[in-house]
């Protein structure tokens, strides 16, 4: 048995060494060729190679300890906790980014190649047209500058350094993979810091459980680890600050270093000021003699931010958004949305965090922990602030992204509840069930289909979309999975394979003639019923056969149609089913009588009107008055 163990250990160790060399070569070169074999290894192999490497490292931990107990392996060696969490973050093999994260993806490369905080070297981002910059960039003083905070890009520098030193080509896919790697490692490190913080006051088993909840049952899994959002670096900084303050209970000198971590958090995400201020008050209250060290340690990141704002924007106090003009949401609507809505609700996507709010109430009882009380103040202030935020739904994202920064605090607030688990089997079952539900929800967020729900959901114009219990980012991917199985199992025709089986019927409560003022828009709700034999596909892999609603304006004889727009499905529609398209259509600028023609199209396959389903038409009289 010992011989078998030694052989297994040697094989695993050798495999780890080979994979580690392979990953390093990919990072340095962005892709390399094996001499003599002609085999080409590309940057696309970074994630799968890392996943295998991490799995082998965890296996090596079990072999070294000769135990199958998670606690025996992970608790004394948090490195293996880091490996396991990072393995979960990289398992989907893709980078789930949006234009919001593109500047952070490219800035480390600019910094390491001597171009400073400019994106001039990436013309694909801006097209070189200062008159029409993308929303995430500014053109100032002859340079392209990120409109977003740059703290995440600075923290990502070590992950880009090998590729820059090795001369990898940034025009390839290496930047996409480096963005995901940096985000995943930074967020996994924050999980380890959360473990260390809890471990100072609770048993290893409790610390492991809470760190796994933090890492896998929150936006850490679905958002922060998937791309270089501001949240991952901010979470790491806040977790470090909480660790310093927790350690300061025994070793007071550590309180001074919390200032640096909080300063980094604010640079990464300015809204974290609402968390930093109560914690600064905590230090002033309980560690008054170290207040000067706390302030001095927090100055470097804040001075960096002032320099950056002055140098690139000409205003040391520049902010991304107007501080006074963004708090327009009705508070109760915003609070209900960010906590309970199926589109963005924190307690819908991470129901296990309900116990964090229970823990928050418990720490305010007699003899409650002052640090946890202070952390809860930061939580409440942040939630109230986002409840008033004019775009509380967070744009194109998955679930409650805007509240991701709160997860280190909410994880620690689980401790008072977890302390009672040994005395209550029902509480244990509740925590386990809600944890599994939370992990399942955020695991769905790591799939490619989940973010597409945002494409046709405009929370500003259609806030009701964020309250659809049968049409949201958790339900739709599951529905898609079932739909794929039904189509494959029964060999059903689809909009991609059977154009002659396409048929639709429309209905609306709009009048046959509509009078509107120029410069306004029409709110359209158009239910379309699938009366054919083919399944309407929402998101086919290659886009072929995707069913979309198309509209155009017809101005009259002798005049060319005015292009309108298209809107896709959010999920597949089987024969007999109905889907309601809901959008806002801008009316033409010139007054006159128009006809708006609305119909369905199966992309790159057929127009429904060509196979027997005439389009819906609406007569619109555009008046000449002011809107």
Image (spheres, grey):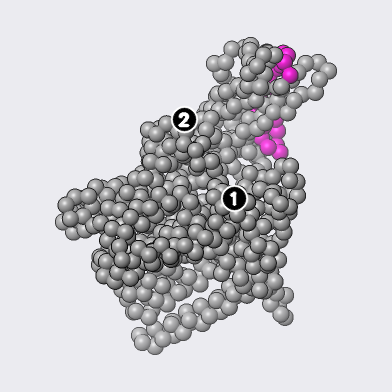
Write down the quadrant of residue 505 in the picture: top right
Question: Which numbered disc covers residue 119?
Answer: none
Q: Name the main secondary structure of what is drawn in magenta.
A: strand
Tell whether 5 sits left or right of 107: left
Q: Is residue 248 left or right of residue 29?
A: left
Q: Position of residue 287 (x, y in %)?
A: 29, 63
Assess disc 2: are there few (<14), some (14-19) or many (≥20) residues with their C-alpha within 10 Å of its C-alpha.
few
Q: Picture coordinates of residue 70 (x, y %)?
A: 33, 69
Label number found at residue 464: 2
Element assignment for label 2: helix
- Badge 1 crowding class, 10 Å Cα cut-off, few under 14, some 14 to 19, many 20 or more, is few
Q: Residue furthest bottom?
A: 3
Q: Is residue 551 magenta?
A: no
Question: Residue at 30% across / 53% down in the picture?
Answer: 374
Range of magenta residues = 590-608
Residue located 56% across and 69% down the image = 158
Residue 350's place in the image compared with 202, above or below, is: above
């Amino acid at each position: 048995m010992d011989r078998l163990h030694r052989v297994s250990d040697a094989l695993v160790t050798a495999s780890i060494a080979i994979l580690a060399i392979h990953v390093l070569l990919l990072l340095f070169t962005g892709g390399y060729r094996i001499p003599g074999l002609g085999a080409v290894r590309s940057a696309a192999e970074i994630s799968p190679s890392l996943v295998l490497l991490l799995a082998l490292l965890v296996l090596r931990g079990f072999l070294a300890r000769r135990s199958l107990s998670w606690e025996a392996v992970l608790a004394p060696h948090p490195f293996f906790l880091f490996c396991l969490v990072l393995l979960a973050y990289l398992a989907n093999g893709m980078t789930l980014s949006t234009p919001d994260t593109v500047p952070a993806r490219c800035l480390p490369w600019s910094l390491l190649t001597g171009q400073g905080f400019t994106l001039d070297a990436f013309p694909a981002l801006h097209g070189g047209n200062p008159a029409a910059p993308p929303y995430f960039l500014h053109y100032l003083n002859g340079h392209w500058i990120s409109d977003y905070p740059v703290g995440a890009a600075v923290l990502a520098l070590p992950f880009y350094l090998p590729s820059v030193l090795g001369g990898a080509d940034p025009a390839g896919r290496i930047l996409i993979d480096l963005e995901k790697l940096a985000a995943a490692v930074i967020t996994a490190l924050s999980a380890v810091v959360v473990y260390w913080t809890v471990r100072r006051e609770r048993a290893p088993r409790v610390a492991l459980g809470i760190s796994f909840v933090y890492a896998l049952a929150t936006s850490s899994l679905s958002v922060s680890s998937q791309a270089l959002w501001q949240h991952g670096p901010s979470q790491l900084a806040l977790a470090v600050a909480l660790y310093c303050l927790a350690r300061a209970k025994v070793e007071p000198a550590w309180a001074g270093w919390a200032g640096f971590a909080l300063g980094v958090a604010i640079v990464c995400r300015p809204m974290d000021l609402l968390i930093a201020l109560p914690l600064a008050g905590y230090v002033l209250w309980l560690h008054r003699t170290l207040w000067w060290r706390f302030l001095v340690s927090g100055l470097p990141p804040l001075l960096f931010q002032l320099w950056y704002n002055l140098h690139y924007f000409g205003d040391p106090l520049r902010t991304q958004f107007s501080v006074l003009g963004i708090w327009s949401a009705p508070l109760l609507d915003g609070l209900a949305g960010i906590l309970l809505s199926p589109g963005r609700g924190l307690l819908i996507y991470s129901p296990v965090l309900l116990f964090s709010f229970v823990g928050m109430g418990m720490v305010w009882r007699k003899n409650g922990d002052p640090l946890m009380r202070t952390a809860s103040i930061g939580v409440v202030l942040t939630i109230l602030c986002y409840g008033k935020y004019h775009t509380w739904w967070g744009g194109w994202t998955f679930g409650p992204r805007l509240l991701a920064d709160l997860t280190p605090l909410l994880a620690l607030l689980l401790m008072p509840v977890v302390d009672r688990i040994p005395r209550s089997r029902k509480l244990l079952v509740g925590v386990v069930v809600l944890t599994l539900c939370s992990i399942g929800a955020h695991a769905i967020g790591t799939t490619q289909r989940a973010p597409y729900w945002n494409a046709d959901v405009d929370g500003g114009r259609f806030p009701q979309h964020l309250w659809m219990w049968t049409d949201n980012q958790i339900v739709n991917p599951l529905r898609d999975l079932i739909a794929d199985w039904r189509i494959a199992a029964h060999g059903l025709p689809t909009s991609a394979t059977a154009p002659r089986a396409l048929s639709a019927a429309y209905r609306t409560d709009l009048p046959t003639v509509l009078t509107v003022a120029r410069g306004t828009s029409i709110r359209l709700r158009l239910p379309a019923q699938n009366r054919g034999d083919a399944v309407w596909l929402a998101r086919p892999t290659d886009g072929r056969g995707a069913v979309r609603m198309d509209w155009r304006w017809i101005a009259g004889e002798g005049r060319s149609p005015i292009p309108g727009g298209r809107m896709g499905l959010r999920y597949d529609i089987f024969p007999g089913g109905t889907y309601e398209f809901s959008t806002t259509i801008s009316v033409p600028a010139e007054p006159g009588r128009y006809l708006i023609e609305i119909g369905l199209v199966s992309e790159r396959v057929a127009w429904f009107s060509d196979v027997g389903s005439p389009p819906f038409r609406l007569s619109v009289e555009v008046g000449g008055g002011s809107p």
